Every structure is written in C-alpha cells, then in structure tokens.
C-alpha cells in the first residue's frame, strides 16, 4: 500500500506516452480511464507469431506465420477479381489471395522473392490459402524479428486497431514492471496462499504477453492459472458489490407489515385446495421478513406449476392487512392479465380494490387510475413495467411482487426500491422465478437476495409424456390434435420462429393458424401472439379457458404462467431452436389437470447429435433443476439466467459455469475480506465493476 503503487492504479491513461486527450476520450467511451483499466483490458485470444510453420503441416483455421518463395502471380476474374500469389516453401504450396490490391502491389510481387506472411489458413479451390495475409519481404537473417511472445488479440470497437491495443498495453506493462510495487494486491497473502493463487502482477503480465511455449489451449479455455487468478478476484469483487447493495438495503427502513391474518384466513378458507408443505414453509419465511423494519429482498424459486401465484397473493394480503398497497408486476402483458384475473377472483370477494396498468392504459383512464392510486383507493395494482414509470405515485406502497424475475435485471430491482411511499420507507420486494438455478449459482448471481424454494408440486399431477417427432409426420400430429379435441381435451400449438422481428413471428403464427383451421375444420382454432391488442388476446384466452376454443396457436408469449388445466396436449414446432429451460416452461402449460398429458417436440430434420441429446433430456426428465443444469452445460449461464438480454452480470474473465469450482471459495473470500480487510472492499469493486456499478449510489 505504498504511494507509488496507488499512484499507478490511479494514473490517468494520458500518463502513457502518445496518449493525448483525443485517445483518452475514445478510451473513456469504453470505460477505460486509468492505466489500471488498460491492464485489465485482457486479450480474447492469441496468435502465434513466434515461429514459422512449414506449409506441409497447415490446417484450415490455423493462424500462422509461413515463409516461402513466390512461384507465380496471377489475376483471376471470377465473381470477384482477385490477385493470387502462389507461394512454396520447397515441400508444399499455399496461395495468398487478395481482393483489394493495387497495380504497384502486383508488380512488386515477382517470382523468386521470399515472403513472410501471417494470416488464417482456409480451404481454397485448389489448395490451402491465406486470405489477405499480412506479408513482407523476408530478409537474409530474419529469425530475430519473429515475436518473442504470443501476440494478444484484444476485444475492440470500431476505430481501435489491434496495433493500438498492443501499443497501449505494451506501454502500460512497461510502467507496471518499472514500478517496484506492481499493481496493488488487494487479496491478502494468506488468502492467495490458501487458494494457491498466482500474484496479480504476474498474472496480468502473463496474460498480455504469454511466453511462446504457453499452453494456448488452456488460455483459450480460460482455465490457465493466470486467468483463474483473475476470475477468482473478479468473482470476489462481484460478491462484494452485491453484498454492499444488500448492506445498503439493510440500512433502509421498510414498513413493518404485521397484519392480523384475517384476510389471509378468509382466502385460505375459500381455496379449493390446501397449501403444500413447501408453500407453507415459504409463506412463513416471507411473513417473517415482512414484519421486519428492514426491506425484504426475497427470491422465490419454484418449478412451473409449483403454485407461486397463491403464495404471492397471501403475501399481498399480509401487506394489505397492515394498511399498505401492493404492486404486482409481470414481464408480459398476457401474464400480467392472467394474474389480474386470478387476483380479482381471489381478492375481490374480500373487498380488496384492484387496479390494472399497462402501457396501453392511456389518457383519461390512466389519469383516473393514477389518482386512485395516489389517494390510496386502490390496494393492489397489477400490470407490466408500466407500474414503475416516473409519474406513477403510490399512496403507501408496502410490497412489490415481481413475477418471472429472470426477465428483469438488477437495475430494475433497484429502480423499484425508489418507489417507496412516504417517509422514506421503501417497499419490501418479493421476486418469483420459475427458472431453477442451482443454489451455488443463485447465490452468486443473486447474492443480494434471500432465497426460498418451493420444492414440491401440488398433489395429483401426472407427469407429461414427451415425444420427439420429425415434422415429416406433421399430418399425423394434426390428426392427433383432432382426436384429443374430439375427446373433449384442448391443445396448444406453439410456433417458435427464427424471424428476428416480432412482426414477422406474429405473421408466421397467423399462417400456421390458418393452415390448421383448414386442416381441422369443425374445431375452433384460436391464436395469440405479442402483437394483438390486449382485448383481443384476452378474448381468445378467455375462450380457451372456457373450452370454446379447442386449439390455441401461440408464439412463445404463452411461455410463462398461462394456466388452463384442461389442456393436455402441446405441440412445439422446431423445439431445437429453444433452450431447454424455455421448453420446460412451455411444457409446464400442460399436465396441470388430472389426465395424462403429452408434449410433442416436432423438430425439423436433420437433427444433429447434440440437438438430439439436448431434447432427450426433456423426454427423460420433468425436474426443472435437472433440466436447468443440463441447459447450463449446453448453453452457458448467461442465457439461462436471462442476463444476456439485459446486459447484466457481464464478467470480464470469470464465467460462472466454467468457474463453478471457484464460486464457493470466492464467497468465503468475500466474507473474510468484509470482516478482516474492509479497506480492500471498495477498491476491488471499483477495479472490477468500475463506474458501471450503480450500487455505490443507491
Ligand atoms: P406457478 O408456480 O407455475 O406460477 P401457479 O401458481 O400458476 O404455478 O399454479 C399452478 C396451478 O396449481 C394453479 O391452477 C393453482 O391454482 C394450482 N395450485 C396452487 N397451489 C396448489 C395446491 N396447494 N394444491 C392444488 N393446486 C394448487
Ligand atoms: Mg406463475
């Protein structure tokens, strides 16, 4: 902790030679302000320019240095005019192919010259080729100009060339090596030793300029000790930032929601079922939290169909008993509407006043609603993200319930906190998700939340039989739908489409519905997709629930939460395009009644081995956790947690799937730092989460 090393961390990029205000500005846009940030801008991969590769051993895809004599130069006039340079190293030949070239360049490339080139090897029509390689004349005694280390390739954006990155990192490394302290090591020595971690400065230097004999495969896989060292520190920093968020949260005041239990009792008595043990346990956990003066932040995890909604309703009643308002938010309008219906059905008989707000509620209706909300005339507001727009004011918001949280991110969680009622009290938060995340992952991804798991399904469910069928048998499947409906059952037909735009997806779903209407005359075929008006969707869903529509064609908008117990057959087109957890959610729409249900995964052949293996997981398991684990292995945690879309949890080095073995250790380390080295907490968070972290301000 000497002056000198602190100074190095805090040094602005302009301290590097050749970095003026203009480059500094460009770097700042990438979040790079200090020399330290440059040092933490790590290569994606490496090129080996340390040796000349004999042409005989080249393989497509390799990036190599080759050296050879020009045998022949020609211009080909094909689809694209190209300059071909035939190069030989005695044993074998390759062709250099250029699409952009000048006459001078062509004329300079004379047979007999020896060239040294660097580029990626590709298969060409005649032999292996290098497309637009870097090249220059090779000198007599050239070996010394080969690189001494592997050449880093950095993540970059337009206008920043690899050369600039290499130059910048080179200068930063020089500065680092010149200072006698190196980078500030914030992890205490005991910890480094205990987890056999490399020293920070050594790891950074290694990763920017690995020696020529470095194990490239380890580096590419991200499991080299130098990378693991950084991954560990990053995970620790991430833990710390979430813990900070949590501590800050703990310092805030929330209303104690005692409640006399009357409303809850009334609802429980009106229900046609009794709560499962798991539901009761989770409700107990929530009830205890709500009575505290610190805001609850609790994630309720429960597989599809585990009965999260009623748990939410009972929690809501506790808040209302205490005289506070509740907001219930869902990620899609369809799902929010379904909650509205359920809550109206359950709560209106108890005299609870329920309001509805989505982006489509506008003008006078919206004004009136907002007024009622502000006056405290409404006890519950159900809707979409619209619930938390700037001008929505609550009279006394005590509890926020967010369903299917994986669609929302940390930042939205934070925004909700700011919606408290009066007196700087902030509301409690209950978050429900059907995405079953393995516990160690959940504790990393959601370290700012407490976790409750509903690990039991209501009794009387029959597991869904899942079949894998080629779409060549579409006719047969259609007949299957017909006969199921003839027996009084209902079915879903889910269109998963590759079209990027929602408009095209909806259009394609319309076409499928049209075809099925033709093929299934006599049956009522309904259609729901994301572009229909709320009223139209509502009408179709109501008809489906009432059994007036037998077959519901839908896009994946029905993925979450839709509940129609009589539906016992689901066809999913092109399931190979979806993730396993998403398919599991979809499939959860059937098997909600007493009868045996089926889910037909109608794939488009040929199905690769991996895709078949993936889909087989669904056939063999109905356990969301098993499926999620497989999904994690096959797709990586970003997509499974839904963080890709929201840009949350982007790690620079760590990968919470690959580095699962580090998760527990990094949590322990975070605990120890908080307890024994509090001075290192903020610097670590700043180093890894930098200015992007909003927690500091919350
Ligand atoms: P999810 O957890 O997927 O949101 P829901 O809350 O939609 O599940 O519940 C699925 C269905 O199970 C609903 O029809 C609900 O009324 C019913 N349900 C919930 N809890 C129980 C229970 N304890 N016993 C029987 N049925 C229940
Ligand atoms: Mg649900």
Image (cartoon, grey):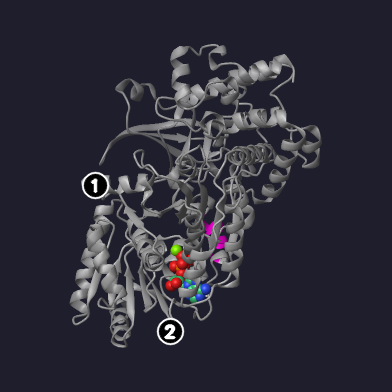
- Region rendered in magenta: 627-635
Using the image, determine if residue 538 lies above or below residue 547: above
Residue position for label 1: 362
Q: Which residue is mark 2?
A: 595
**In this rendering, position of residue 293 left or right of residue 679:** left
Residue found 62% across the figure and 32% down from its top: 685
Mark 2 C-beta closer than 8 Å to ligand 1: no
Above-or-below relation of 481 to 49 = below
The circle on residue 608 is none
Residue 34 magenta-drawn?
A: no
Q: Is residue 178 visible?
A: yes
Give me the C-alpha separation between circle 1 and circle 2: 43 Å
Q: Position of residue 128 (x, y in %)?
A: 44, 43
Residue 321 locus on image (x, y percent): 49, 58
User: Where is residue 151, by image quadrant?
Assistant: top right
When the figure is inspected, residue 544 is found, relative to residue 282, above or below; the finding is: below
Task: State the SS at label 1.
Answer: loop
Residue 412 locus on image (x, y percent): 45, 43
In-image side of 578 versus 678 (left or right): left
């Amino acid at each position: 902790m000497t002056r000198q090393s602190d100074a190095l961390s805090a040094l602005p990029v302009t301290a590097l030679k050749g970095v003026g205000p203009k480059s500094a500005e460009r770097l700042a846009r990438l979040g790079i302000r200090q020399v330290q940030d440059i040092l933490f801008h790590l290569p994606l991969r490496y090129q080996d320019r340390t040796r000349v590769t004999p042409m005989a051993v080249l393989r497509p895809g390799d990036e190599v240095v080759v050296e050879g004599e020009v045998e022949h130069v020609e211009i080909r006039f094909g689809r694209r005019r190209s300059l071909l340079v035939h190069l030989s190293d005695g044993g074998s030949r390759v062709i250099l192919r250029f699409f952009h070239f000048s006459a001078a360049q062509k004329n300079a490339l004379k047979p007999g010259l020896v060239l040294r080139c660097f580029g990626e090897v590709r298969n060409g029509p005649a032999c292996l080729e290098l497309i637009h390689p870097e090249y220059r004349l090779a000198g007599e005694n050239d070996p010394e100009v080969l690189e001494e280390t592997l050449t880093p390739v950095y993540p970059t954006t337009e206008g920043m060339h690899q050369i600039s990155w290499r130059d910048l990192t080179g200068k930063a490394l020089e500065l680092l090596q010149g200072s006698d302290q190196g980078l500030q090591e914030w992890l205490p020595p005991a910890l480094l030793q205990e987890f056999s971690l490399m020293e920070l400065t050594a790891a950074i230097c290694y990763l920017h300029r690995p020696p020529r004999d470095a194990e490239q495969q380890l580096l590419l896989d991200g499991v080299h000790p130098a990378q693991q060292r950084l991954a560990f520190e990053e995970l620790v920093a991430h833990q710390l930032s979430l813990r900070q968020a949590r501590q800050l949260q703990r310092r805030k005041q929330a209303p104690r929601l005692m409640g006399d239990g009357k409303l809850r009792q009334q609802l429980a008595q009106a229900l046609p079922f009794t709560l499962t043990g798991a539901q009761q346990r989770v409700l107990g956990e929530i009830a205890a939290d709500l009575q505290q003066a610190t805001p609850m932040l609790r994630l309720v995890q429960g597989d599809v169909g585990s009965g999260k909604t009623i748990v939410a309703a009972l929690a809501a009643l506790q808040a209302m008993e205490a005289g506070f308002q509740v907001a219930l938010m869902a990620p899609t309008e369809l799902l929010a509407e379904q909650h509205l219906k359920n809550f109206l059905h359950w709560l209106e008989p108890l005299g609870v006043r329920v309001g509805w707000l989505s982006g489509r509620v506008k003008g006078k209706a919206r004004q009136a609603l907002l007024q009622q909300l502000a006056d405290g005339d409404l006890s519950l507001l159900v809707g979409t993200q619209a619930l938390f727009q700037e001008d929505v004011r609550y009279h006394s918001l005590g509890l926020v319930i967010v369903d299917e949280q994986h669609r929302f991110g940390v930042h939205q969680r934070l925004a909700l906190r700011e919606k408290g009622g009066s007196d700087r009290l902030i509301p409690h938060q209950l978050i429900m998700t059907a995405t079953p995340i393995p516990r160690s992952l959940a504790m990393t991804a959601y370290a700012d939340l407490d976790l409750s798991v509903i690990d039991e399904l209501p009794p009387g469910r029959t597991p869904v039989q899942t079949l894998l069928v080629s779409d060549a048998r579409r006719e047969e499947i259609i007949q299957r739908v017909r006969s199921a409906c003839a027996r009084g059952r209902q079915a879903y037909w889910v269109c998963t489409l590759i079209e990027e735009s929602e408009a095209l997806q909806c259009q394609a779903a319309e076409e499928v519905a049209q075809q099925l209407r033709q093929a299934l005359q006599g049956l009522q075929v309904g259609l729901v997709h994301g572009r229909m008006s709320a009223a139209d969707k509502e009408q179709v869903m109501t008809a489906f629930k009432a059994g007036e529509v037998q077959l519901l064609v839908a896009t994946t908008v029905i993925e979450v939460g839709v509940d129609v117990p009589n539906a016992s057959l689901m066809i999913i087109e092109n399931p190979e395009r979806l993730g396993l957890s998403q398919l599991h959610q979809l499939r959860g729409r059937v098997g909600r009644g007493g009868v045996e249900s089926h889910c037909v995964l109608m794939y488009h052949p040929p199905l690769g081995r991996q895709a078949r293996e993936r889909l087989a997981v669904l056939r063999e398991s109905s356990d969301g956790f098993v499926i999620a684990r497989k999904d994690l292995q096959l797709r990586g945690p970003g997509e499974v947690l839904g963080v890709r879309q929201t840009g949350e949890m982007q790690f620079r080095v760590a990968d919470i799937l690959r580095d699962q073995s580090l998760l527990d250790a990094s949590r322990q380390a975070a605990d120890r730092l908080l307890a024994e080295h509090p001075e290192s907490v903020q610097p670590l968070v700043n180093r890894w989460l930098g200015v992007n972290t909003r927690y500091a301000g919350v």
